[in-house]
Amino acid sequence: MNAPLHKPFPEQTVLVTGASRGIGAAIAVRFASIGMNVVIHYRESHEAANEVARQCMKSGAKVLTVSADIRVKEQIGKMREKLELHGMMPDIVVNNAGIDHYGLLSDITEAEWDDVMAVNLKGTFLCTQAFLPYMLARKYGRIINVSSVWGISGASCEVVYSTAKGGINAFTKALAKELAPSGITVNAVAPGVVDTDMMQNFDPGEKSSLQSEIPAGRFALPDEIASLVYFLALPESSYITGQIISPNGGWLT
């Protein structure tokens, strides 16, 4: 039996981490399009976050922007206090914030390894842990983690990033089993190549070569990833949990 809704879906609140640009911004705008309450998290990109907030408010959504370093538990705690103060505790948590690293394993420093792990994996853990009690008390919630196709297949010269995203996939599967009896679903979206700022490091030739490997013949748009995240958050998606879903244009099957 589906977990009962404690409030109508459009009246729920979604927290999107790393929502000042790219996939995170698209996710925030998608939820705002139905007038849902949206919390836009960012670390330093204040103006970019405000611009996303303005886009969301055009749909009539109630929006709150909040800054926090998700590597630091105390800052997550302060973020939680702010959300509680504004009546914006999330029914849906989208753990999107992440950083990439490209380079040979032999060249990666310990500090670089720790930072990628802290933002991608530890940040997902800390944000989930902080807001889980609210969901448990209501026996309803959605946790959606943004992973990567590299977390499934691995990628040369992206060992640390692949490892972090693989950890998110394992975290998703294990937590889904833990929370299923409480009416809370946990899933991960593991995109292939998405046309975001992360692609700026690739020259036109590299982009063309990469596109030729993808059966769909193109990169994903952030809006396409946002649509999948939105679908997983719907009340009628309550039987989907513990899944790693990879929208990648047929690149990895």
Image: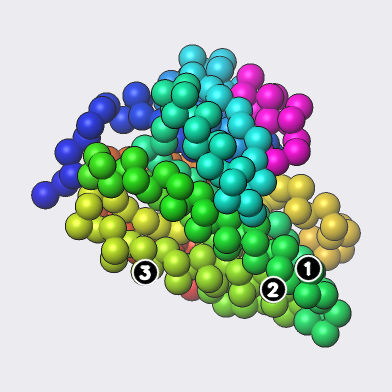
Q: Where does label 1 land, which residue?
A: 112
Q: Which residue is mark 2?
A: 160
Secondary structure beneath dot 2 equals helix
How many other residues sit within 10 Å of disc 3, few (<14), some (14-19) or many (≥20)? few
What separation in Å lies between label 3 and label 2 (alpha carbons)?
21 Å
In the image, which is nearer the foreground, mark 1 or mark 2?
1
Mark closest to the chain's N terminus, 1 or 3: 1
Going by the numbered disc 1, the residue's amino acid type is Glu
| Residue at x 63% of width, y 51% of height | 72
Instruction: Find the magenta span and give its range.
Output: 42-54
- Residue 170 rendering spot, x and y as whole percentages: 45, 71
Which residue in the rendered view is the most extreme toward the bottom?
106
Q: Judge whether residue 23 can be spotted in this image.
A: no
Q: Does the CB distance between marks 1 and 2 fall below 8 Å? A: yes
Is 112 above or below relative to 87? below
Residue 36 forms part of the magenta stretch: no
